Amino acid sequence: MEAININDNFFSGFYKDVWRKLVPAGLTEAEIDFIAAITDLQQGQNVLDIMCGYGRHSLALARKGFNVTAVDNSKEYVLEIEESAKTDNLNVITVHSSVLNLKLEHTYDAIICMGNSFAFFNETEATSILKNLSKHLKPGGIFLINTWMLGEIAIRHYREKDWFYAENYKYLVDNSYCFNPTRIESDHIIIRSDGETEHIKGVDYIFTVAELQKILENSGFSLSEIYSTPRKRKFQMGDTRAYIVARKSN
């Protein structure tokens, strides 16, 4: 029986379109350069992109000559990536699967998890995912996690209520900061310009740096460094996002 996560359907409605509009111009390009540098990837090497969404990193990495395996639980995203890869003749293998139930056959030179998706999982789930990934990452290989739900971030920037516009969408969110386990439970209301409304719920689990370091170590990784920007600015209190670099223990 496949494991179910409350966030599984988060990207199945309006948010699938909203998410594209929330990504700042130039961010993906900067992150791709950062990924290539931090992992020391060479053309022809293999990259696993888990919870890849619409493939903004997978496709860009493939354009740089890397062999990419793109994993997502959204069939629509997977089909979109397949079409783009076929049109541009890119070396991208797609896998339609929840990361909790992911079955891998190959070994990868690097693994990435971008866009805060790692926060969808509690400690037990995160450990299970990491142990599975560790088996399929070469010794010394890099696993990169991008998140804005570290405890050191969330406790400084938490807001009970927020709202904003994303082009033709109005977005409202109510948050509850909860404990045991530490998490933010959120209610989202998205209103399209034609008046149609979507209501979705989500949960982001929060780990402090120390807690995440322990989870990584228990799963076969060591925490190497944390940056706050793709330009390798070291992470510090007050920053709003983190790029966590973990290395598979030999």
Image: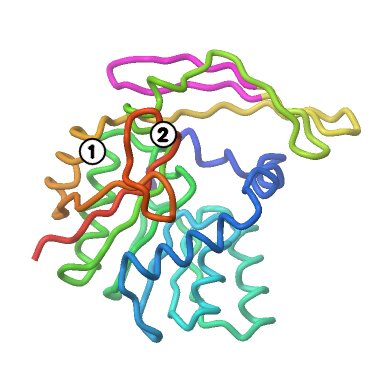
Q: What's under tag 2, amino acid-wise?
A: Asp
Let me know if residue 184 is in the magenta part.
yes
- Taking the magenta stretch, the answer to whether it contains residue 8 is no
Can you give x and y, in whole percent of width and height, for residue 166 in the image?
74, 37
Residue at the image position 31 percent from the left and 73 percent from the top = 40
Q: Which residue does the image show at 43% across and 36% down from the upper left? A: 148
Is residue 34 or residue 70 the one in the foreground? 34
Q: Which residues are magenta?
A: 173-188
How far, Cα to Cα, is label 2 from label 1? 17 Å
- Graded by Cα atoms within 10 Å as few (under 14), some (14 to 19) or many (20 or more), the crowding at tag 1 reads some
Q: Name the residue carrying label 1.
A: 212
Which residue is at a point 82% across and 33% down the rendered structure image? 192
Q: Which mark is residue 239?
A: 2
> What's under tag 1, amino acid-wise?
Leu
Rendering quarter of residue 43: bottom left
Q: Residue at x 19, y 46 (%)?
A: 216
